[in-house]
Amino acid sequence: MLKAVILIGGPQKGTRFRPLSFEVPKPLFPVAGVPMIQHHIEACAQVPGMQEILLIGFYQPDEPLTRFLEAAQQEFHLPIRYLQEFAPLGTGGGLYHFRDQILAGGPEAFFVLNADVCSDFPLSAMLDAHRHQPHPFLLLGTTANRTQSLNYGCIVENPQTHEVLHYVEKPSTFVSDIINCGIYLFSPEALKPLGDVFQRNQQDGQLEDCSGLWPGAGTIRLEQDVFSALAGQGQIYVHLTDGIWSQIKSAGSALYASRLYLSQYQITHPERLAKHTPGGPRIRGNVYIHPTAKVAPSAVLGPNVSIGEGVTVGEGVRLRESIVLHGATLQEHTCVLHSIVGWGSTVGRWARVEGTPNDPNPNDPRAHMDSESLFKDGKLLPAITILGCRVRIPAEVLILNSIVLPHKELSRSFTNQIIL
């Protein structure tokens, strides 16, 4: 028997994903046509012996999240529950706080997946490796070049046994080209070191506060408090993958993840990819079109385009490397490149919306990694173009590298600006 836990965080996290996370919780943002965490759930549901999937975070269980969970349970025929933290507890605090629910039924092991990663999720391969050589912690790792490895947790392994000998989260100097993918397989005994961290936090807090249980004791960071401390003690091992992987930290990285998932659909979900048909729009490369979308026959879509529910795409529209969210309208001869068009937005005739390509590939030394803020020295950094919800862009407007927030109508061209 197996279980899976997906760590979805909470509203004060994911600030680099704003303004997109103002409308829906970040884990429900559509990537390649489906909510971000649906890719995780689909992968978990395919593992033989999977009995339950738990989501842990501190979002309020609002209507969109509840509706998604109900639909997912029906689709995947698995119990899928949301466990809400009483406060932000870090990447490991929720696992320890809900340990009884995780261990209920006696699972042999449980997967732990961060919601903000994109991957082909080689869970069955990780399970085989775990059963061949059981250990409390198994981390999924991949390679990065020397420059980009500094943006991730770095793993030094024994190349013969794959034991993790050393672990450093975002080091200041080069440590290793093996990085942590944020996907794990834990044995039930892995929760004991988390309990040790909790007790140590409680004791440290009581030295400062004699009133009893210290509120911060429940905050546990898997990477710093557990992996770094236990590395080299024969408890943590790494399983390397050469499959697709990236983080989804900002809007730009969501486009990159959409590209990866659309490519993966050729193998996993070919039915989701649009086909070029007589009398239909011209399809170039991998494109997802929601069945309710209306696309004019003269439109040219792709590569790497996702069109959401109820979208209207007019005659002569050109779309490439973009996500168009539900209810948006692209009027005649619009050109949208490397951009995200928000919910209910309207882009007028002959308007051009173009963002900066943003490919956070850990093996590309020139890639722009999304670890920095949208602003630097009071200026907006060149980034993906985002059109917020219910924004109307009139005809013949040029927008480059800008973020346009909700309820605004533009009447001239903007370059590298944020419209508040």
Image (spheres, rainbow, N blue to C red):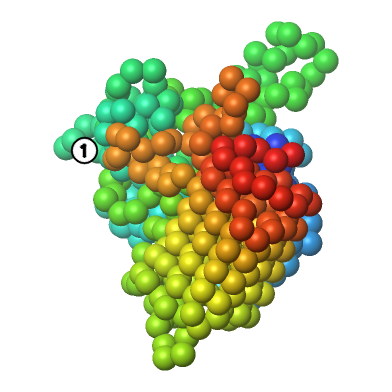
Q: Residue furthest right?
A: 211
Q: Nearer the viewer, residue 377 or 161?
A: 377
Residue at 30 percent across and 22 percent down: it is 174
Please state the total of marks drawn on the protein image: 1
Q: What amino acid type should be assigned to the residue bearing mark 1?
A: Thr
Q: Looking at the picture, how far across and down is residue 397, in whole percent?
A: 62, 54
**Figure check: 356 above or below 390:** above
* Residue 235 shows in this picture: no
**Figure check: 67 above or below 385:** below
Q: Looking at the picture, how far across and down is residue 261, in whole percent?
A: 42, 61
Quadrant location of residue 66? Answer: bottom right
Quadrant location of residue 64? Answer: bottom right
**Figure check: 66 above or below 187:** below
Residue at 79 percent across and 11 percent down: it is 210
Residue at 51 percent across and 25 percent down: it is 225
Question: Circle 1 sits on which residue?
Answer: 161
